[in-house]
Image (spheres, coloured by chain):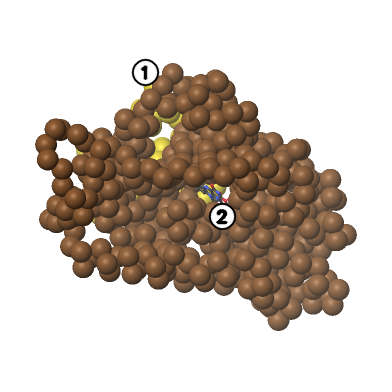
Amino acid sequence: MKPTSIEDKLAVNKYDIDKERHIQIREDICATCEAHPCLYACPADCFKLREEHITFSYEGCLECGSCRIVCDKEAVEWALPRAGFGICYLFG
Amino acid sequence: MNQKFDAIVVGAGPAGCACGLTLAKAGLETLIVERGKFAGAKNMWGGAFYGPSLYELFPDFWEKAPVERYILRHKYSLLTQDASFSVDFTSKKYGKPPYNGFSVLRSKFDRWFAAKAEQAGAVVATGLEAEDLLREGNAVAGIKAGGDKLPANVVIACDGVNSILAEKAGLIGKISPRDIKLGVKEVIQLPRQLIEQRFNLHGEEGIAWEFIGSFSRGIPGGAFIYTNKESLSIGIVVQLSALTEKEISANDLLEDFKRHPEVENLLADGQLVEYSAHLVPVGGKAKMPTLYTDGMIVAGDAAGLTLTTGLVLEGANFAIASGKAAAETVIRAKKTRDFSKQSLARYPELLEQNFVLKDLETFKKAPLLLENPRFYHQYPELACELAEKIFTNDGKKRKKFWKMFRESQRGRISLWQMLRDLFRIKRAI
Ligand SMILES: Cc1cc2nc3c(=O)[nH]c(=O)nc-3n(C[C@H](O)[C@H](O)[C@H](O)COP(=O)(O)OP(=O)(O)OC[C@H]3O[C@@H](n4cnc5c(N)ncnc54)[C@H](O)[C@@H]3O)c2cc1C
Ligand code: SF4
Ligand code: SF4
């Protein structure tokens, strides 16, 4: 069976994962957010809603920038991973 | 490093490589910085190169560049849940040099392109990120990268859709998710013979196949399949704002698309080798940032220079053409030693002269047109239902086609609405 979940798909990708997270989210602001557009916009499922709480994990990030654009509360402190880290496409 | 460069190009995508190559060929001291470990490491697309932009830089590039297949067939399909209605176009002309288009995998292609810029004399620094701009007064005077200050007469921001540099220079404001499409794609490996059998191709022939329809659940956008040598590039490109409004993840739409009966068999026994995502700026001419300021020019996706008409999504040729125009502007500025705004104003003039701004002007109403939800539901349903009625033989007395059409059209969409949409299509594309 071919992978259908994002998690399984990300597993085939090549990453050089940095120790530091390149994107920070302001959880205090997220706590006031009702629509959570980031949940649907992120193609790598980095944002998750757990018991009314938005959590963020940076490891699978595809560096697309969707979260930066859809978050209208400026809760995403978006940056690129340090040069040389992050996703490394072998096909593209 | 404290050498001052004539020009620093940020980003080694098609815009940056074309720009850096043109500058270096003219003898300017040029640095290209690229944040990926190698050029292409951060880049994905559909995709295929069309038109003469590349050919003008490299007259026989298909013999040397890592292209996958030349595009012989173009196919467009309207999909409903269980049916599809297609137009399939093949021309012998597309099978001869200089060809009309090539499918390309960016990770290999961009690396080749950057190496060409390097051979022309540009310094290509990979694994280096431009973090900020250097300034002298109000003018941009170089970049900060990897903790170093790198001065230059002019900076050309070819840093793609999330252009941090255009933002830092104050040339672009907050981008609206309405003006952005998100592309997600899978590269699926398949043996050559299977690809050729399934898509009716021979040798190096390839197909570019675009889809719109029910799989996008009313979200403006579409899907694509491109054939590579030994893999398929399959993905969707959908409006970001509509995804979040409808609370749908792009991957779910991609999965729906992959399960469509027209598509599923094409992928059978394939192996996923990469899952990728990238944004496309689709705001068109109305949403372009300011293209230049003192000591700086913006080109390619960073400048929002892509064309989406519903039938095509093109950006790489615009990136190359704008990168070249930026380089030509800088080459002239160097002669007069004037890198001010006034001198760089030549850049939009050059873009007006070549196809870049002309095409964007011609299709400036396309972005709004493509938000019309009827293109994704009612019209594909109408086309498929009508075709089904025409082709189904159930032994009953037949009706005239016009009557069949009226039956399918009624209750779905009014004739008046169709005429208005037709008028909008005519105006926009
Ligand atoms: C899903 C999808 C399908 C597409 N299909 C097609 C198609 O079939 N045909 C077509 O012509 N176009 C297509 N496009 C559009 C096309 O990919 C882009 O228009 C084109 O890549 C733009 O080139 P660019 O050089 O401006 O930007 P990019 O290709 O994005 O290159 C930007 C470069 O800058 C680097 N960079 C960014 N920030 C920094 C920094 N701070 N420091 C150093 N380096 C940095 C990046 O790593 C990258 O290498 C598609 C796009 C998508 C998303
Ligand atoms: S959209 Fe912004 S504020 Fe809302 S949950 Fe996501 S990151 Fe937080
Ligand atoms: S940049 Fe893209 S992949 Fe990374 S967290 Fe944001 S939305 Fe997700």
Q: Nearer the viewer, residue B171 or B18?
A: B18
Q: Residue type at mark 1: give it.
A: Met
Q: Residue type at mark 2: give it.
A: Gly
Q: Is residue B335 visible?
A: yes
Q: Going 45% across and 53% down the picture, which residue do you hit?
A: B311
Q: Mark 2: give few (<14), some (14-19) or many (20+) Cα within 10 Å.
A: many
**x, y percent for residue B64:** 76, 38
The C terminus of chain B sits in image quarter: bottom left
Rendered residue at 38%/25% (across/down):
B265
Determine which of the numbered discs, if any, sits on residue B169 in the image. Answer: none
Q: Is residue A62 left or right of residue B101?
A: left
Horizontal arrangement in the rendering, residue A45 relative to residue B69 (left or right): left
Residue farthest along the front direction in this orientation: B397
Say which mark, if any, is on residue A1. 1
Pinpoint residue B118: horizontal percent, then vertical percent. Answer: 81, 46
| Chain of the residue displaying label 1 | A
**Both on one chain, marks 2 and 1?**
no
Q: Colour of chain A?
A: yellow
Ligand 1 within 8 Å of disc 2? The answer is: yes
| Dot 2 and dot 1 residues touching (CB under 8 Å) | no
User: Label 1 neighbourhood size at 10 Å, few (<14), some (14-19), many (20+)?
Assistant: few
The numbered disc on residue B315 is 2
Distance CA(mark 2)–CA(mark 1): 35 Å
Residue furthest out toward the bottom: B342
Q: Secondary structure at mark 2?
A: loop
Relative horizontal placement of residue B197, taking residue A51 as reference (left or right): right
Which of the 4 image quadrants contains residue B152? bottom right
In the rendered view, tell whether residue A18 sits above or below residue B273.
below
Any part of residue B147 in sight: no
Q: Which chain has been coloured brown in this picture?
A: B
Helix, strand or loop at disc 1?
loop
Q: Position of residue B35 (x, y in %)?
A: 64, 46
